[in-house]
Image (tube, coloured by chain):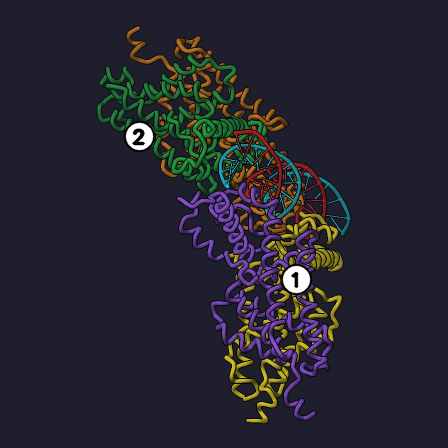
Chain colours: A green, B orange, C purple, D yellow, E red, F cyan
Amino acid sequence: MPAEIKPARKVAANATAAPTRKGPSTGNKKLEQRQISMESLLEAALRLFVSQGYRSTNLEQISGAAQLTKGAVYFYFRSKEAVLIELLKRVQRTVVDEAVLRVNAAGPGFTDKLVAYIHYQAGLGITHRDEVLLLILMSLEFKEREGDVQVFISELYERQRSFIETLVHSGQQAGEFRADLSTRELAAIILAINDGTFLEWFRRSATLEGPELVRALRAAVLGAATVPPAASLQA
Amino acid sequence: MPAEIKPARKVAANATAAPTRKGPSTGNKKLEQRQISMESLLEAALRLFVSQGYRSTNLEQISGAAQLTKGAVYFYFRSKEAVLIELLKRVQRTVVDEAVLRVNAAGPGFTDKLVAYIHYQAGLGITHRDEVLLLILMSLEFKEREGDVQVFISELYERQRSFIETLVHSGQQAGEFRADLSTRELAAIILAINDGTFLEWFRRSATLEGPELVRALRAAVLGAATVPPAASLQA
Amino acid sequence: MPAEIKPARKVAANATAAPTRKGPSTGNKKLEQRQISMESLLEAALRLFVSQGYRSTNLEQISGAAQLTKGAVYFYFRSKEAVLIELLKRVQRTVVDEAVLRVNAAGPGFTDKLVAYIHYQAGLGITHRDEVLLLILMSLEFKEREGDVQVFISELYERQRSFIETLVHSGQQAGEFRADLSTRELAAIILAINDGTFLEWFRRSATLEGPELVRALRAAVLGAATVPPAASLQA
Amino acid sequence: MPAEIKPARKVAANATAAPTRKGPSTGNKKLEQRQISMESLLEAALRLFVSQGYRSTNLEQISGAAQLTKGAVYFYFRSKEAVLIELLKRVQRTVVDEAVLRVNAAGPGFTDKLVAYIHYQAGLGITHRDEVLLLILMSLEFKEREGDVQVFISELYERQRSFIETLVHSGQQAGEFRADLSTRELAAIILAINDGTFLEWFRRSATLEGPELVRALRAAVLGAATVPPAASLQA
DNA sequence: AATGAATGAGCATTCATTCAT
DNA sequence: GATGAATGAATGCTCATTCAT
């Protein structure tokens, strides 16, 4: 994870351009505080948006959980929506961008790549559970709404889809994946299994064994994607 | 029992044709009127809850879509929540109860039963799309909230789960389904694939071919559940 | 006393040229800096209060326009209100005090004094447009509010009124001004014409010719104040 | 004043189209209540907007003064701004439209028309004081703001201006008004005197005698507009 | 059978002000 | 000399709910 942070205001830009007076120590303390407050706000928002939904979470809950007041949220973000968008940007990096890198690095076969994808996602379910869920849940909550959030999520999902579709298509071309299912629908099912599993895990993670679940997940994805071995024998 | 509900659609057709007060001649006018109004309210609510979410739908939208006013909702229902619960009761009958009947009637093998389940669900996705989605979406929107809705949905989901778990367990016992995956997690994945596919279809039904999607869905579920044929040959 | 203020404009020019910290070489840097910052705050406040109103202008706009931050305002002033009061004090000197001096110096007749008043005001409309308008606009915005501002403005207006009333009364006594109109109301009309003309000019200065407007203004004031020449001939 | 009322919602349209059930008596009671509540809200808003300004008046004050709650305002109007716009529409009819009618009916000379204008305005100052002031004050408060209010007021003012300009121009052509002043600026001064007098009366009506003030006002306007009699004799 | 009027709690957002640095 | 962080009160607006008719 790079040290991005994205300051809510032009402040940071100024800071880089002309750090005014102050020795570096004082500046660091302020910057540190900024970091801390912003992170705890984002962290609180992430947790609450995932567990209660965006609309059902109010700013008092977010700021309260970060031990700040409502006003502080507006010091760091332009609006409640801006908080969500900042979170989604992080999700993009962690969930989507990184997945692409991992899959590209995996190989050599396309089945290997697909397995790498499944395992990366499964790992995210443990290390970045809320971030993954945020994307799925917000994609549902904002489905019909217009605005920046909807646009951002749509683009994100579209990128995910086209990435998986390309992977599936290549695998089909290479004879590793079943060619008797259309690329688009096969890709859709892979994403569907992924999202569905996250949601089921979200609903009842307490009663499910992670590793076992992943094995079943892998079986499902490979079952859908790969040529049934028996069939291939028969062919 | 199969003849139960489905009026949601029929009524709406009526509603468009003659949605205003009283039919011209029939005898039991009052009762009919009641029926019509209530149904059009429920139909409107179903559509809106699914497309916008429960919290983001207000009573004015619901009553307006049914050509009535907010007050009318309170004539027929105790509260906004009561509208949702009534809808969920119908979903229960159509989606859960009926599925159980269908699967029980299918056979003789457990694979046949599982296929029957998948196909019944796929059929629902066409004939009762919104009802199926309502259950999934509300299960997410009400996850952390307490109250009647949450309880009702939890029970519903629990019944679904235990039904599928029983099916899976029996199939495993019979040697039709893989025994190298734990029952609970395998059942969870089957439900996950189901829900996930509905959601993906919800997000982009316009760009997906139903029949193709069902084939891929079946491949995934069977891929997860059944012993890989090749393996069985080798065994 | 004539050399008093007008830095509002000069400073701004400086501000654009080199608004940041410290001049390069001069001796009494600190004091200069203070002066510059304070002046640019006041200048910004004046412009914004006039164009948007006091209440609709926030401290961020003021400090931002002066290339400073909100906090700086509190370094120089006790409160937002204190900024306005400081501006009003300057207005008092420029607009009211100076007008008194000019009129007193004019003569010998009272008509001459009245004409001097009109012309001084007209001149202010060009050299100190915003300052004149500030007084008029704030007198309206603070009409019902209690507090320092209201008191200050009331006293200022009262001084203006009594000054004009005295002038009118003297002119009437001397037979130069109409005696068939009561002193108080005649004075009120003179002030009304003055304020009204400023406001109309404020609303649409782009479409009005200054000199022409002043001629009409003079005709109105003299028309109200002086004995109609024809009547005097007839008398 | 016609019985317009302008229902905040489509309700009224429905009511006219299909009064549903109910005898006329019940309907009347509801309509009456509607009328009463709406009027008292508008009345309260008018008084408060004039005395405190638009921005400094909150909905609690308005609804409280009408013995209702904030929510009721939103039952009758779309927003706070919509309340103001409804008030301005009434002002338009009373102040602008009616003035045009009166002046057109007056005559035969243009001086008569101008006097009729002054007297109508003076009368309004007594019968519709707040309405006249609302227009003037809001024209200042909304000067730089964009939006419906600003547009509405601008158009209103523009109509007033062009009406007076036409009057002045005709009077100049007819030789009744001074031709040595440009039409536009002379018209501007007439409006300025009018507005200025209203404002001064607004500031201190308690200390001014209405009739005396009107005489002085008339002297000022005629002094500005008409050829000085002496000059005409000399010519 | 249904409406229109009205309420009141909740919420996002704005903004003057404070204060440590 | 000035900033950045943070507060808390105020405010416009939404919406489920109540109730007389």
Question: Distance of mark 2 from mark 1, alpha carbons?
Answer: 60 Å
Q: In the image, is residue A4 above or below residue A151? A: above
Task: State the image coordinates of residue D70 (x, y, percent, origin top left).
Answer: 68, 48
> Which label was assigned to residue D5?
1
SS label for mark 1:
loop
Task: State the image coordinates of residue B232 (x, y, percent, origin top left).
Answer: 32, 9
Residue topped by disc 2: A165
Count of numbered circles on the image? 2
Question: Which of A72/D167 is in front?
Answer: A72
Please tell me in which quadrant of the rendered image residue D36 appears.
bottom right
Type of amino acid at the residue the image marks with label 2: Glu
Task: State the image coordinates of residue A55 (x, y, percent, origin top left).
Answer: 54, 35
Task: State the image coordinates of residue C123 (x, y, percent, origin top left).
Answer: 53, 69
Question: Which of C109/B107 is in front?
Answer: C109
Label 1 packing within 10 angstroms: few (<14), some (14-19), many (20+):
few
Q: Is residue C85 left or right of residue A193?
A: right
Residue drawn at 54 percent across, 25 percent down: B97
Q: Chain of mark 2?
A: A
Q: In the image, is residue A224 above or below residue B181? A: below
In the rendered view of the protein, which quadrant contains the N terminus of chain C?
A: bottom right
